[in-house]
Structures are given as structure tokens and as C-alpha cells.
Image: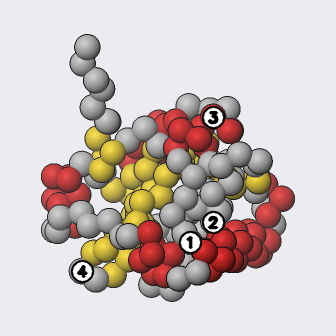
Amino acid sequence: MPCGFFAREKTMSIERVREYFETLGIADRIKEIDESSATVALAAKALGCVEGRIAKTISFSLDGAPILIVAAGDMKIDNAKYKARFGKKAKMLSHEEAAELIGHAVGGVCPFAVNEGVKIYLDESLKRFQTVFPACGSANSAIEVTLPELAAFAAPVEWVDVCKLPETSQG
């Protein structure tokens, strides 16, 4: 694919989210920042918050269908918990698959304005925070939402517990 394809997809993706949020009357809450927020660390720095408050959206393939899990930024998927919940080993989508199947490119994947048929799950790890910052379809956007708002705007299938704290280095 030509390089311009991904740039165009990212622009279209944030516009999809903006249009969705306009129907909810909250498009003005999208924060577009000058720096990249494509990783949890970059997003937390740009937004001035702890990494846990970044609501990272991870894309997986489950029985050939795309699913999203939204988790606190300081958490990792626990393979045993994932397999116990979904009955399969976790298989992340490639960058190309995420853009095509989810409708948002990696770095801007979010649980809003996704392609039809994408199932969304919210991880319990988010419940430690009053508000969180999910992306809005681009690598330099976010929106601060309460957990009830996140649940309303993302329309998840359910809350799940499939994460563990990342291992800290011993030293």
C-alpha cells in the first residue's frame, strides 16, 4: 500500500469519530495535540496524566472476527485470563488487519465509530479511575470520559477481567 494510504486512513478515522461524537453533542471535547499520542507513554506525557488513565484499545482476532479490549494503559493482557474468558489464545491483529477490520489504524484505535460487527469489551482495570483518555481515531487525539460515558459511547458487549499488571523489573 502506498504511504499516503495510511495517512488518509488516519484522517478519515478521526473524522468518523468526530461525526459520531457530533451526534452525541460532544465533538468539541476531542483533544487534538501537537505531539504523537500513539503509545501509552506518549499519550500520558502529552495529556499530563498517569499511564493507567490512558484507555488503550487492543485489537484481537477471535474465531476470525475482530474484537477490541479497552484496558488501563499500565496493564497487560493476561493470556491465561484471556483464554479462560474467550476460550482461545489471544491473537492480536496486525497493523494492516486492524486498519481494515476495525476501521482505525494502530496508534489511533479506539472503541468509537468502529466497523460494523466489531465487538468491544471494557476491562475491569479501568475501574480504578474516575476518568480515562481513549484515542479518537488518530495518533494525536484523545477524549477524557467518565466510565459511564465510556460504556455509553463504546457500547461494549460487557466488562471483562483479562489483564494483569505489567511485571516490574527487579534490581
The three-letter amino acid code for the residue at tag 3 is Lys
Q: Earlier in the sequence, mark 4 or mark 2?
A: 4
Q: Marks 4 and 2: which is nearer the front?
A: 2
Query: Looking at the picture, how far across and down is residue 51, in whole percent?
Result: 52, 36
Nearer to us in this view, 11 or 157: 11
Disc 3 target residue: 45
Task: Assess disc 3: are there few (<14), some (14-19) or many (≥20) residues with their C-alpha within 10 Å of its C-alpha.
Answer: some
Q: Are marks 3 and 2 in contact (CB under 8 Å)?
A: no
Q: Single out the residue that lies furthest toward the top.
A: 171
What amino acid is found at the position of numbered circle 4 in the picture? Asp
Q: Are marks 4 and 3 in contact (CB under 8 Å)?
A: no
The residue pinned by badge 4 equals 63
Q: Nearer the viewer, mark 4 or mark 3?
A: 3
60 over 40 or under it: above or below: below
Residue in the picture at 59% in, 41% down: 42
Q: Nearer the viewer, residue 74 or 46?
A: 46
166 up-or-down from 61: above or below: above
Q: Quadrant of residue 114?
A: bottom right
Label 3 residue SS: helix
Nearest to N terminus: mark 1 or mark 3: 3
Is residue 84 shown left or right of residue 110?
left
SS at circle 1:
loop
- Using the image as rendered, state which of residue 4 and residue 107 is in the foreground: 4
Which of the 4 quarters of the picture holds residue 22? bottom right
- Dot 4 lies on which element? loop
Q: Earlier in the sequence, mark 4 or mark 3?
A: 3
Q: Which residue is mark 2?
A: 137
Q: Is residue 154 visible?
A: no
- Sooner in the amino-acid sequence: mark 3 or mark 2: 3
Reading the image, the residue beneath label 1 is: 104
